[in-house]
Image (spheres, rainbow, N blue to C red):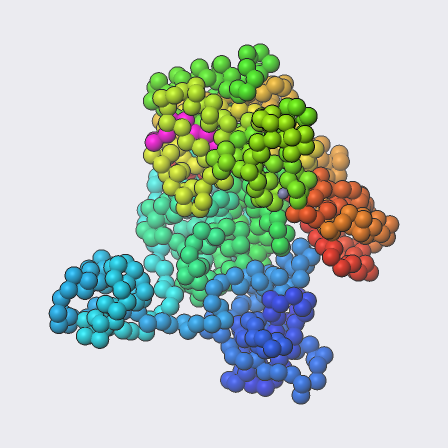
Amino acid sequence: MQDTQAPEFFDEGTPCGVLTAEPLGRVLDYLAPEGGAWIGAFVEVPLGPRRVVGVIWGASEGSFPIVKLRAIIRVLDAVPMGAELRAFLARVAEYTLTPLPAMLRLATRVPDLGSGPATRKLLFRSDTPPARMTEAREKVLAVFDGFGGAGLTPGEVAQAAGVSSGVVRALVKSGALLEREALRDQPYPRLDPAREGPNLTPDQARAAAVLATGVQSGAYGTTLLKGVTGSGKTEVYLEAIAACLTQGRQALVLLPEIALTSEFLTRVEERFGARPAEWHSGVTLSERRRCWHMVGQGEAQLVVGARSALFLPFRDLGLIVVDEEHDSSYKQEEGVLYNARDMAVLRAAMSGAQVILASATPSLETWANARAGKYARLDLTARFGPNTLPEMRAIDLRAEELPSGRWVSPTLQRAVTARLAAGEQALLFLNRRGYAPLTICRACGHQVECSDCDARMVEHRFLKRLVCHQCGATAPIPATCPACGAEDRLAPVGPGVERLEEEARALWPDARVAVLSSDLFGSARALKDQIAVIAGGEADIIIGTQIVAKGHNFPNLTLVGVIDADLGLSGSDLRAAERVFQLVRQVSGRAGRADKPGRALVQTCQPEHPVIRAILSGEEEAFWQSESAQREALRMPPHGRLAGIVIAAPTLEPAFELGTRLARADAPLRAIGAQVFGPAPAPIARIRGMHRVRLLVKAPKGAPLQGAIKTWLKPHKLPRGLRLSVDIDPQSFY
Ligand SMILES: Nc1ncnc2c1ncn2[C@@H]1O[C@H](COP(=O)(O)OP(=O)(O)OP(=O)(O)O)[C@@H](O)[C@H]1O
Ligand SMILES: [Zn+2]
């Protein structure tokens, strides 16, 4: 770690090193401003003709004559970044081979950091009534009464009352409203960890006690909380949060899906009497700002957020919960390529915090870490209350009569009909967005592809467009074949959720059908609303992609039908088996969560496949052992390490050329016992017009992979127009 010798305070006019988010690759020297500045202070500095935001990172590098240094313009109104966060950013940068400025950008994604005062003018109601009352004025005063005397900005008042700003100004002038300077970022209401929680079952209580003891130790530790779906993992980790808040330390809960936050926020409110801070792309800019500053001031006790919440400036982080820790969305696949689950463990280790990794179907990595004793493990083996786990059965598609263009087998159809008759809900799960995965010309066999990507266009009837799932490009559905010109011969092949919806409406014309697919909703809020509607019972049949698999509680849902369990099994992906296992077990767990027993019917053409057998039997330990053994034999993660290299270029040749050069100069990799495979065209050989070439580095477990990769890449200058990205511990190989 750097700066152990760096001074804590820089007197005015002394040089210090400032890190900015500009892609310069190093810390720049500046002179401390009037009044001096603390290390970690957020500052504004001149950079060429511009002013940019930075952080005082440490001592001056001394590489520049002091007389030529420019001075820091000012210290910003924010709590200085603590040593722990600075060290964490440096470690993540090293681990993911990311330049530090990009890390700083991740940690300062807050609006108006460089501008705007920390206070703003707010209006309050005075005791003086307005000289003359009008309808508009009455509306304004009613707004203040409605907000219980809280201060509001003039803009907020005008909008809430539906009046012009002139009306508000006149009321200020007459003295009926008072103007006062107020803190721009309001503190959060206090959460009360002493409030009584639910009565835990003996198993839950035991797990909660162990977790609370861990938190109370004030030391680092990671625990896998493995509980079957509906076992009360959330209730248990809420107790660990209570212990953390009681100690006066901050807690962070990471969720894999924004749509899950609203249910969780309600549960926090029930348990602690107030709502926590939220950090994800679905919150407003002013809420983001409030969250960032309050976390930095130690005023936010609990944050619920997406993976980037890990880079918030916590003052004293005591606990990180990673819910559904196996979820692949914890891996950031663009920009800084990091796995939030793994980086949570790193941050906790650096700040003496506990980590709880919660899942019914943990990742193989976590399972293996628990087996090796690196993580503790707690098991909840039964559902809460009288509920039992759903009964699981296969439907052998080879034995069913299924006309072409239909995907619901007669057996599944009968089961759904029976549930509807009983007034219960059924869920049909198909992990495919859109109407049909493939559009093919029946005259010439042509498949419609994206013009910029090596990917087929997917028909989305709801949008009335073809959509590329790689780059998001859309095109009208053509009436004639783009290759042979034949009219009306383009036909959809295979099912997506929209086509399944069509089938469901035909099979059960009287049922209320709701589709849940991430692309059907303009906003996270709309998706949340739809989920609430379903949970409230206003749908009989729910059709969904993988977003329905995650953590939802639909009390009246008693049947889950998995339309195609084989989907994903045939892929060459390292984690194909693991993913199918997790997804199908997870989605089946949505059934029978309240007082009625549930059932899951799994349609498959290969009921004797080991993964399908493991899903049905629920013999998870055996499944993980065999998966682990297979990966061990291949020296694949978690028993070996991987790094994916992608070279992208407007034309294929220079990308391949660089790849070949790299593959030949592999001495630094061989030095640590690593091998390089490739170059080869990536499985998706073109995205957004860029050709993609992949290399894969495979190293023994425990080998110093990052250092070797750095040494390996260093001598190779990147030709113009080429992009090279390194993905340490890759999750996807597209
Ligand atoms: N001790 C308890 N007292 C009252 N209700 C409980 C208790 N434990 C669990 N529940 C209820 O049981 C349901 C399932 O619990 P919870 O959501 O915590 O399970 P989970 O293990 O997180 O589930 P999943 O992994 O499927 O998301 C919830 O409605 C929860 O409120
Ligand atoms: Zn595309």
Query: Is residue 373 at all visible to an observer of this figure?
Result: no
Q: Nearer the viewer, residue 310 or 645?
A: 645
User: Which residue appears at 53% of the width and 68% of the height?
Assistant: 81
Q: Is the residue 705 above or below the residue 388 in the image?
A: below
Q: Is residue 605 magenta?
A: no
Residue furthest to the bottom in view is: 67
Instruction: Decide if residue 145 is on the left or right side of residue 680.
Output: left
- Residue 492: image quadrant is top right
User: Which residue appears at 70% of the width and 44% of the height?
Assistant: 686
Q: Nearer the viewer, residue 189 or 514?
A: 514
Q: Quadrant of the N terminus?
A: bottom right
Q: Is the residue 316 above or below the residue 206 in the image?
A: below
User: Which residue appears at 57% of the width and 56% of the height?
Assistant: 347
Q: Is the residue 407 above or below the residue 628 in the image?
A: above
Q: Which residues are magenta?
A: 537-549
Q: Nearer the viewer, residue 523 or 152?
A: 523
Residue 158 percent across, percent down from the top left = 28, 63
Query: Is residue 37 at all visible to an observer of this figure?
Result: yes
Ligand 2 found in image quarter: top right
Callout count: 0
User: Which residue appears at 58% of the width and 34% of the height?
Assistant: 478
Instruction: Decide if residue 174 is on the left or right side of residue 540.
Output: left
Residue 366 percent across, percent down from the top left = 60, 41
Residue 333 percent across, percent down from the top left = 62, 48
Instruction: Decide if residue 645 is on the left or right side of residue 276.
Output: right
Residue 210 percent across, percent down from the top left = 48, 45
Q: Is residue 545 magenta?
A: yes
Q: Quadrant of the C terminus?
A: top right
